[in-house]
Image: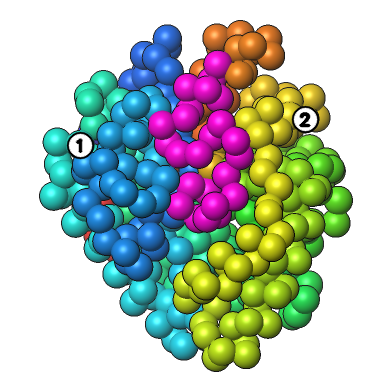
Amino acid sequence: MIEKILFEQDVTMRQKCLALLSIAALMVGCGQAGALNPDQLIVVDTHIDLPYRLNRNYENVGQLTEHGDFDYARARRGGLSAAFMSIFVPVEKQSAGLAKDFADHLIDLVESTSSRNADKFEIARSTRDIARIARTNRIALSLGMENGAAIENDLLNVWHFYNRGIRYITLAHGKSNQISDSSYDPNRQWGGLSPFGVKVVQEMNRLGIIVDVSHITDEALLDVLEVSETPVLATHSSARSFTPGFERNLSDELIGKIADNGGVVQVNFGSAFLTQAANEWYLQYYTEETAYRSEHELGQYEPVPEFEEAYRTANPPPYATLDDVLDHIDHIVNLAGIDHVGFGSDFDGVGDSLPIGLKSVADYPALIEGLRERGYGEDDVLKIAGRNTLRVWAAAEEHAKIQRLLALHETDSGWYRGRYK
């Protein structure tokens, strides 16, 4: 019916485009915001490294597990509504040319986990899915890819991963790749985004994939903000003012620019991201761990329990606290406003470095209560817990719908109809 109205009427191109934009806005307004109970607490965590954990040591997270930070029982106790499963591509897979295959393997693992526990989990591909699943006793598992190296120099792979359910992509990880420089890598080969990286961001915008600016350099983040037509997420980053010199966290200036873009900073719970003392301890630890791996010819992500135990015994690590997490939230709110902060825990990704009082997905209630004790009203709590994140996701969906409608207008070849489903 939409096509009949728009293509058969004798109106100008400008009139058609305005009509398309209006229809898209109506679709999003009715389909997204209206699907949420305005008083319901939706807790969204944008970064949980469960897939990589299960790849290394499989457990059925449909029941209480012995290891890790996430399982269904603890997530229900914690009131978690939706968790972005991190499809993490290690640098070792990137350098070996196995990035895409490994990402597909981890997606397979999440799909298997969900299907085997269909009464507990469901994969969510849209904000409407989140709202629907939140009304049940199940937990929504969304997919975010950590390390755009899996795109492997082929823009068609952006579509491939969108079709598999990926709804954000962290452009780089521990090393620079074909898309962007990494904040952890002294080799800044692109000085920000690469030319291919610009195309990747544009394609992500077109399809409705959120751009994740965690892990990339300051210069690359500024490039993203110039290119992206939709709000961005920093899915698991904290405020650099608490950890001076640690580029992996965000400067006050960049937090402000992300807010100007409409984006959201999702606070990382790892102690190294929260306090200067913990940051310094972990930087020294990783320096010595890297030397140990090199001496014993071990890969970057191979477990080294004997080294870790000996080092921690000799040098006990300082842990952050729940209050430190709240301090980061307060800081971002003071800088950027209540609409630009959320949760990006990095559960199952930061090892034994989680704050005192916030050790697993069972502990979100302590965080929510901490917000209330600091004077945040109920509307503020709803925003921080999940609605800010869902707003960014909905904006990506809206932009993609508009692009689809414009593409339908611009061609009658059927190519777009086949590509967008």
In depth, the one of 177 and 290 nearer the eye is 290
Q: Nearer the viewer, residue 355 or 116?
A: 355
Q: Position of residue 343 (x, y in %)?
A: 55, 36
**Which secondary structure lies at badge 1?**
loop
Q: Give the label on residue 54, or none.
A: none
* Residue 264 found in image quarter: top right
In this view, 29 is above or below 341:
above
Q: Is residue 153 above or below residue 368?
A: below
> Which residue in the structure is indicated by mark 1?
120
Q: Which residues are magenta?
A: 346-369
Q: Quadrant of residue 59?
A: bottom left
Q: Residue at x 75, y 80 (%)?
A: 187
Question: Looking at the picture, which amino acid does disc 2 mark?
Answer: His
In the rendered structure, find residue 331 and report the number of the disc placed on it.
2
In the rendered image, residue 12, in percent from the top left (x then y), is placed at 48, 40
Dot 2: element? helix
Q: Going 70% across and 33% down the picture, which residue do you hit?
A: 324
Indicate yes or no whether the magenta region holds residue 189.
no
Question: Main SS of the magenta segment?
Answer: loop
Nearer the N terminus, badge 1 or badge 2?
Answer: 1
Residue 366 appears anywhere in the view:
yes
Asked if residue 361 is among those painted magenta in the image, a careful observer would answer yes
- Where residue 321 appears, x then y in whole percent? 66, 34
Report whether residue 161 is seen.
no
Left or right: 126 with respect to 97? left
Q: Is residue 252 left or right of residue 321?
A: right
Of residue 80 and residue 56, the one placed in the foreground of this image is 56
**Amino acid type, residue under disc 1 in the picture:** Lys
